[in-house]
Image (cartoon, rainbow, N blue to C red):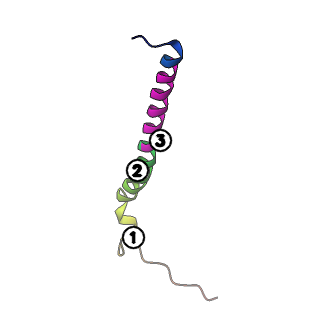
Amino acid sequence: MSLTQEQKNQEVKTTEENARRGFLKRAAYAAPTIVALGALTKPTESKAGFGKPPSAPNWN
């Protein structure tokens, strides 16, 4: 049994749609992960005790 041209086109469209959906799903999960990893690369910015103390206020 051979497929008609319309059936072949429908099969190609379905495959392309599935590929797009897969890409969007991966992108949706990857974006928050990338943001979280970016925050982990600079942990010293969030720790207390690093850097110089704040300057005294100038009340003049």
Residue in the picture at 35% in, 58% down: 40
From the viewer's perspective, is the residue at label 1 or at label 3 nearer? Answer: 3
CB atoms at circles 3 and 2 under 8 Å apart? Answer: no
Q: Is residue 15 magenta?
A: yes
Which label is found at residue 51? 1
Q: Nearer the viewer, residue 2 or 40?
A: 2
Q: Main secondary structure of the magenta part?
A: helix
**Mark pair 1, 2: CA separation:** 27 Å
Disc 3 designates what residue? 24
1 to 54, vertically: above or below: above
Q: Residue at x 43, y 54 (%)?
A: 32
Q: Quadrant of residue 59?
A: bottom right
Indicate which disc, 1 or 3, sits on the residue closer to the N terminus.
Answer: 3
Between disc 3 and disc 2, the foreground one is 3
Disc 3 marks a residue whose amino acid type is Leu
Residue at 49% x, 19% y is 7
Asked whether, in this view, residue 43 is left or right of residue 15, the answer is left
Give the vertical position of 14 relative to 47 (above or below): above
Q: Residue at x 35, y 56 (%)?
A: 41
**On screen, 28 above or below 6?**
below
Measuring from the top left, give residue 3's x and y in whole percent: 45, 13
Q: Give percent across and percent down for residue 21.
A: 46, 38
Q: Secondary structure at mark 2?
A: helix
Q: Which residue is mark 2?
A: 34
